[in-house]
Image (tube, rainbow, N blue to C red):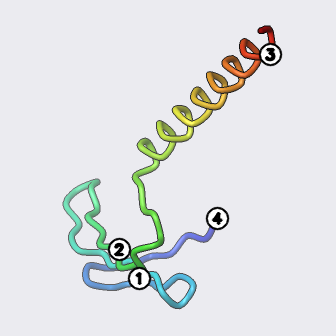
Amino acid sequence: MLALSRKKNEALVINNDIEITILDIRGDQVKIGISAPKEVPIYRKEVYLQIQEANKEAMNAAENLEALGNLF
């Protein structure tokens, strides 16, 4: 993991087309802004993990339906 220090209104660039800017710092909370192409999905990690879990459950359900279909 790369750790960088940034101050308010400073930014960093990832892969030439994603820019992350520090918008505000209040206590232990940091507000960031992200500029990225529309085709780049951006999720909070807790939401991303929920999506991954839902996808796994959907795959398991599809496999169970397929196995059930093979019985007939």
Foreground tag (3 vs 1)? 3
* Residue pointed to by mark 3: 70
The disc, 2 or 4, on the residue closer to the chain's N-terminal end is 4
Which mark is drawn over residue 19?
1
* Residue pointed to by mark 2: 34
Q: Is 2 situated above or below 67?
A: below
Q: Secondary structure at mark 2?
A: strand
Can you say which quadrant of the picture contains the C terminus? top right
Query: Is there a contact, CB below 8 Å, between mark 3 and mark 4?
Result: no
The disc, 3 or 4, on the residue closer to the chain's N-terminal end is 4
Residue count near mark 2 (Cα–Cα under 10 Å), binned few <14, some 14–19, many ≥20: some
* Residue pointed to by mark 4: 1
Name the spot of residue 36 as percent of width and height, x first.
41, 78
- Give how far apart the Cα atoms at labels 3 and 4 are: 46 Å
Query: Is there a contact, CB below 8 Å, between mark 2 and mark 1?
Result: yes
The disc, 3 or 1, on the residue closer to the chain's N-terminal end is 1
